[in-house]
Amino acid sequence: MTTSRTSEAGRPLATQSTTRGACRLLRAHDWSFATEMKLPNGRRADIVAMSARGRLLIVEVKSCAADLTADLKWAEYREFCDQLYFAIPPDGPIHLIDEAVGLIIADTYGAEFIRHPQEASLSPPRRRTMIIAFARHAADRLHATLDPDLR
């Protein structure tokens, strides 16, 4: 799906819809999530989710084949999660998704896990770093809703 339509936030509508559906799926499976989170290596993950047991997953959202083939930085996310997924719209480029990565098909209303990746296990220091980063990111997002003028 290629579209030039964008949301008020400047993100393509297909990306926004796919993100929303993937987040709904994660929430339905009892994962808490944060969007657009900066990782310790300076990259920004589309979705970082944490389970009640502290397991971490990252979801990279791709709206079309061009988006997927133009962005190869996703491999740098693996060292910051136990599982890595791609979320794509229903008409997305399934054939381009690496078999070692999990796959979620999502639209505005929901999503489905198509394939789960092999799980890795973060080292305790890396997990601690990510849990703290997740908590701080979530707290900063909440604060921004309470006081949008304070930076």
Image (tube, rainbow, N blue to C red):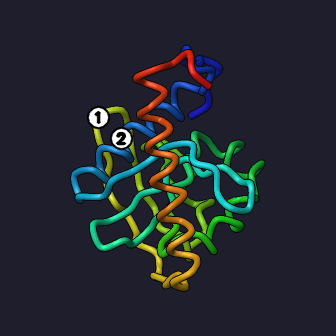
Residue type at numbered disc 2: Gly
Q: Which mark is residue 1?
A: none
* Residue found at the very far front of the displayed protein: 150
Q: Is residue 12 left or right of residue 69?
A: left
Q: Residue at x 22, y 52 (%)?
A: 28
Q: Is residue 69 left or right of residue 132?
A: right
Q: Which mark is residue 109?
A: 1
Contact flag, marks 1 and 2 (Cβ < 8 Å): yes
The answer to whether 103 is drawn above or below residue 128 in the figure is above
Residue type at numbered disc 1: Tyr
The answer to whether 16 is drawn above or below residue 150 in the figure is below
Q: Which residue is mark 2?
A: 21
Query: Nearest the camera: 9 or 104?
Result: 9
Judged from the image, the secondary structure of the residue bearing numbered disc 1 is loop
The answer to whether 58 is drawn above or below residue 18 in the figure is below
Residue 47: x %, y % from top left: 50, 50
Quadrant housing residue 41: bottom right
Return the disc, 1 or 2, that comes first in the chain's sequence.
2
Q: Is residue 67 left or right of residue 140?
A: right
